[in-house]
Amino acid sequence: MKKTVAEVILKQLSYYGVKRIYGVTGDAIIGLLDAIAKQDEIEFISVRHESVAAFMASAEAKLTGKIAVCTATMGPGATNLLNGLGDAYSDKAPVLVITGQAPTDKIGTDFQQYVDQQELFRPFAAYSANLASENAVVDIMQKAAQVSLQQRAVSHISIPKDLFKMETTAEAKPLPTVLKGTFSFDVQELEEVISVMNNAKKPMILAGAGAEKAAPTIVQLAKQWGAGILYSLGGKGIFPNSTEHLLQGIGEGGNPYAKNVFKEADVVLVAGATWWPDGYVPENAKIIVIDLHIENANRRMTIDFGIKGDTQQIIPLLLKGIADHMPNNEWVELINQTKEKWENDNESEGLVNGFPVHPSRIVRALERVVEEDAIIALDTGNVTVWMNRNFRQSNQKILFSGYWRSMGFGLPAALAAKLTCPHKQVVAVVGDGGIQMTLADLLTASQHKIDITVVVFNNGSLQMENDKIQAGGDEEEGTQMLNPNFANLALACGWRGYQIEEGQEMEMILEEAIRIKGPTLVDIFTEQAFFPETEA
């Protein structure tokens, strides 16, 4: 019995492990939605804006490493996806996009809402194709999925409206099994790199998200080598806070004292990271980078030695190679002094009293109440740097918009995280500017009964931009915001809403909000505190 194109698409997606599709209903994808309604393997998560659908797919893909899917109608629906797809593209999340297109006999004409979608998606999609024949659907789906998974990229398929319900001879099939072995390095092949490491007097290690599985061995390496450990925002949380030689984060929001130490380094090992912030770069160091996608690192930093491989396989070889290395005790002492100084300052910052509440005080409260294995969806803006600066992670997973840095990421990411990991505690930490971009999707949480907590840093401004304006001596324009009562607004959308007022116990309210089943929002009046490391 023949199946329709839409039915084959869903069966194909099920072979990829897809459980849900994020999107907004639209005319050009009604055939796909009809097929979704007639089966129960894949759920349609209807949202209020297509950018939210794309952000949710990006967040799910970042969290799982597997294909996540979003959909939209043609024209404005497709264009609304682009911001969220920019996030997936920038952070290398494997997202598959399915968009409706004009009927086959209207493509290339002046048909309403028609646009050449392959040109539209070109900046973000590593693969984009228009389905021209109902019998090519499986071949195109397979190509798109393979590109997404192999390149950790966005892939896109546009499908003419009339093809969704057309019968096809194509039959769904799973992807070929890809066996991922280790790279065949041995100590002898790394001899030149190991020689440089053994001659280091002031070594440093910078770890990113790609070093997560190698983290315990990196700690051993740092001790044997006498190196300080820094992490990018993507690497935050992969080392316990008590880790020996750990100097915390680098860049805006990191350890403010680590910058000067890092600049003195003579050899830097970059593990699973492809970027570091301007102004923090060692001036005369040999740079060794380990990454599966070394070509990305080479575009963003000057590298002396690039090792294309898995940190989990390479780090033990380097550790073996420096087994006889004698650490520089003076350098180790400087690292430990820098670590202790920031730990003391960080503890003090989290105890700041007053109302409106200082951002550091909110961060410390969150640190105390969230579970050790919680997922924290972090929005972009002033809230990002304060969390990076003061949040002392244990085993929490942080989702954020890395290179794209889009406001409005926090709420969609939290929604997707809870759907993907229903047994995990999920908390969105957002600024008032970021949450205002996605307020309509409070209703998405109510409609789909998604149990998350949103914490709003409500300072009545776009504070990060305001800080930059102050630092540059420019005139303020457009940063001060008229905010609604977020707690009442959440209540109107079917949430529980809390507003923290002067004299109230913040931890107690946060604990109650997180404990309640169903979506809750905590609105905290926040001081417009100037971030100390702001540069114009």
Image (spheres, rainbow, N blue to C red):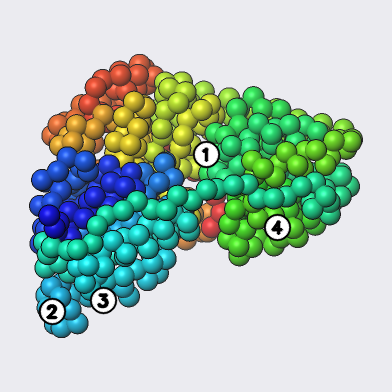
The mark closer to the camera, 4 or 1, is 4
Residue linked to disc 1: 388
Q: Amino acid at mark 2?
A: Lys
Category of crowding for the residue at label 4, using alpha-carbon neighbours closer than 10 angstroms: few (below 14), some (14–19), many (at least 20): some
- Residue at 19% across, 82% down: 108
Q: Amino acid at mark 4?
A: Gly
Q: Nearer the viewer, residue 97 or 222?
A: 97
Tag 4's secondary structure? strand
**What whole-number distance in Å separates the C-alpha atoms at marks 4 and 1?**
28 Å
Label whose residue precedes the other's in the sequence (1 or 2) = 2
- Residue at 42% across, 61% down: 147
Tag 1's secondary structure? helix
Label whose residue precedes the other's in the sequence (3 or 1) = 3
Category of crowding for the residue at label 3, using alpha-carbon neighbours closer than 10 angstroms: few (below 14), some (14–19), many (at least 20): some
Marking on residue 106? 2
Category of crowding for the residue at label 1, using alpha-carbon neighbours closer than 10 angstroms: few (below 14), some (14–19), many (at least 20): many
Tag 2's secondary structure? helix
Q: Tell whether label 3 touches label 2 (CB within 8 Å).
A: no
Label whose residue precedes the other's in the sequence (4 or 1) = 4
Q: Nearer the viewer, residue 168 or 183?
A: 168
Label whose residue precedes the other's in the sequence (4 or 2) = 2
Q: Residue furthest bottom?
A: 109
Is residue 21 in view from this perspective?
A: yes
- Residue at 50% across, 43% down: 385
**Whether residue 325 is situated above or below residue 31 in the rendered picture:** above
Residue 220 rendering spot, x and y as whole percentages = 73, 31
Residue linked to disc 3: 116
Q: Amino acid at mark 3?
A: Asp
**Whether residue 164 is situated above or below residue 444 in the rendered picture:** below
Residue linked to disc 4: 306
The mark closer to the camera, 1 or 2, is 2
